[in-house]
């Protein structure tokens, strides 16, 4: 075993020390090393801008509103979620997608309401809170219908758990949601 190891080691070292590599000439690429052939830049080729074309930086005197910018960004995310809910209601009325989107909206609304207490955000916070409350009510209603509809009679509940009533409620909520989204977008703070 020891002899085999020494033999393999000897062969490996001989390959490494053999020094074989590329043998031959490299092709001529036509690149000249003569720097005297480069053309000097003439002054007529340079274009000088007149002073009235230069941009002069103007110092921004308006203070940066970091809280307002963060609020705008978070409210924009909540508006996207509301538009997603409206899209679900208008297109396929998928129960699972609606519940998931309503849960995400609830988390986003809770975060916004907990983080931004300033008076200037009160109107949009109130509107967002109301929309979120309505969304959660519709979500709860839809969950109850999916859970209880097979077990209750149409006569005893006066059709409260019927698919027709559910579609009517979802369509009404979609219309209300569209108005609320436009109203939130129009608020300036």
Image: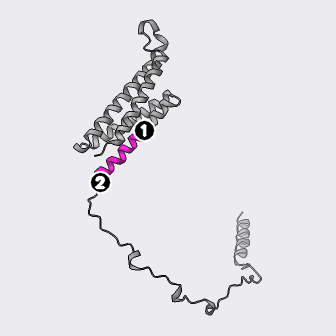
Name the residue carrying label 1. 81
Q: Position of residue 60 (x, y in %)?
A: 29, 64
Vertical relation: 92 (above or below) 45: above
Q: Secondary structure at mark 1?
A: helix
Residue 141 located left or right of residue 41: left
Residue 96 located left or right of residue 184: right
Real-space Cα distance between discs 2 and 1?
A: 23 Å
Q: Residue furthest right?
A: 24
Q: Position of residue 120 (x, y in %)?
A: 24, 44
User: For the image shown, how many numbered marks are present on the structure?
Assistant: 2
Q: Position of residue 114 (x, y in %)?
A: 28, 40
Q: Which label number is shown at residue 95? A: none
Which residue does the image show at 30% across and 45% down from the upper left? 188
Asked whether disc 2 touches disc 1, contact meaning CB atoms under 8 Å apart, the reply is no
Vertical relation: 143 (above or below) 119: above
Pick the residue in front: 175 or 17.
175
Q: Position of residue 162 (x, y in %)?
A: 47, 15
Which residue does the image show at 38% across and 40% down from the upper left? 78
Which region shows up in magenta? 65-80
Q: Secondary structure at mark 2?
A: helix
Q: Residue furthest bottom?
A: 36
Does 73 appear in magenta?
yes
Name the residue carrying label 2. 66
Q: Quadrant of residue 184?
A: top left
Which residue does the image show at 51% across and 28% down from the upper left? 94
């Amino acid at each position: 075993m020891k002899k085999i190891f020494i033999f393999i080691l000897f062969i490996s070292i001989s390959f490494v020390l053999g020094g074989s590599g590329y043998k031959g000439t490299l092709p001529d690429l036509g690149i000249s090393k003569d720097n005297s052939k480069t053309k000097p830049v003439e002054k007529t080729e340079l274009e000088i801008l007149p002073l009235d074309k230069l941009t002069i930086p103007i110092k921004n005197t308006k203070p940066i509103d970091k809280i307002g910018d963060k609020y705008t960004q978070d409210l924009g995310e909540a508006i996207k979620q509301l538009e997603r809910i409206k899209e679900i209601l208008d297109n396929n009325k998928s129960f699972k997608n609606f519940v998931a989107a309503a849960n995400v909206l609830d988390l986003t609304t809770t975060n916004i309401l907990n983080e931004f207490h300033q008076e200037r955000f009160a109107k949009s916070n109130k509107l967002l809170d109301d929309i979120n409350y309505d969304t959660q009510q519709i979500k709860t209603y839809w969950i109850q219908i999916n859970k209880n509809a097979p077990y209750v009679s149409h006569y005893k509940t006066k059709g409260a758990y019927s698919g027709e009533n559910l579609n009517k409620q979802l369509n009404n909520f979609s219309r209300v949601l569209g108005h609320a989204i436009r109203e939130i977008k129009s608020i300036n703070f």
